[in-house]
Image: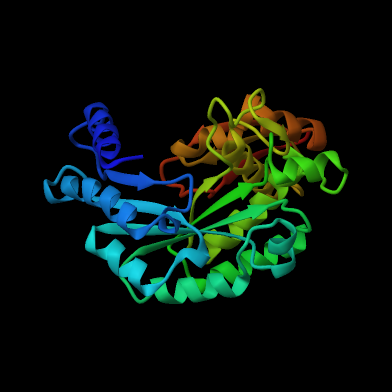
Amino acid sequence: MTADDVRRIIDEHLKTLPKAQRRVEAAFFGGSFTGIPIEEQSELLNAAHEYIKNNKIDGIRLSTRPDYIDRNILDNLMKYGVTTIELGVQSMDNEVLKSANRGHTREDVIRAVKLINEYPFTLGLQMMTGLPGDTDERSLKTCDEIIALKPDIVRIYPTLTIKDTFLEKLYHDGKYMPQTVEEAVELTQKLIIKFEKSGITVIRAGLQSTDEICENGSVVAGPVHSSFREIVESSIYYDIISEKLKNSDCANADVFVNPKEISKAVGNKRSNIIKIKNTMNIDIKIHPDGNLKKREVRCVAVKKT
């Protein structure tokens, strides 16, 4: 990528955005930005920074590795208006990181976070589930350690096995068993709840679908699903609703949720309504209630006669 590429991409996207867009940022994602020579970093950042100076965008965000952070790099990022740095933490367990051939350690993460916190950047930390050597317990411990680092935002990525990768070889050699969609959903649900209870926003769960990252693309195995986050959110609502109805001894129930949350409460293809009918023999209807907050649920049950 060159500076001209940066300008072209920003110009193309600005044409598609409404003028009243609340916030626009340029993003350098999909690699380890601060691992490239600092001269190249500066060239690309300067191209994007021109749009900040002209009030056409509001900031720059990037993703990188924890072991590609030092004070010189951070000073340079500040110079060009970078607002958000996301670190690919993946795990806080050194055995998992070594098994997954990540190339950095838990200590690298702690050091990088400490340095970044000396600057006014928004800090994002990315974790992965289902890595080689990982378990649900280890992922939950990683979650706790990430919470202790107090990032502003978090992303959760269940591990996918992609063609022509180190992980694919482990998979075909029988040395790695990926998560199922159901396993990844169950774990991610617990992680989201833990992060949100700690006041940390989970801005993404699951990789964004592309022509390559999809069921029929380059994914060999793993919990790939185009609506992964939606399934996780629906699973959370199922647990909340079923908990409220478990001792109700009713045949029917009206369930009220925030209007913006109705699709999540209903579930993909009405999955929550069907599952509650099958497991609890209760017919439910989901209704909007603007007085309720996210994940706040009110149930009105009709007693069996």
Q: Identify the image quadrant of the C terminus.
A: top right
Front one among 176 and 153: 176
Q: Position of 16 compared to 218: left or right?
A: left
Q: Position of 7 compared to 249: left or right?
A: left
Q: Can residue 249 be seen in this view?
A: no
Taking the spot 77% from the left edge, 35% from the top edge, the residue there is 304
Above or below, comparing residue 159 to residue 123 in the picture: above
Q: Residue furthest right?
A: 174
Q: Position of 304 compared to 302: left or right?
A: right
Which corner quadrant of the image does residue 179 belong to?
A: top right
Residue 79: x, y in percent? 23, 63
Front one among 244 and 44: 44
Q: Identify the image quadrant of the N terminus.
A: top left
Above or below, comparing residue 152 to residue 164 in the picture: below
Front one among 4 and 65: 4
Taking the spot 60% from the left edge, 62% from the top edge, the residue there is 194
For the image, the number of numbered tags is: 0
Q: Is residue 32 visible?
A: yes
Residue 232: x, y in percent? 63, 42
Which corner quadrant of the image does residue 161 belong to?
A: top right
Residue 224: x, y in percent? 66, 35
Taking the spot 58% from the left edge, 28% from the top edge, the residue there is 212
Above or below, comparing residue 193 to residue 27 in the picture: below
Front one among 7 and 110: 7
Above or below, comparing residue 45 to residue 217 in the picture: below
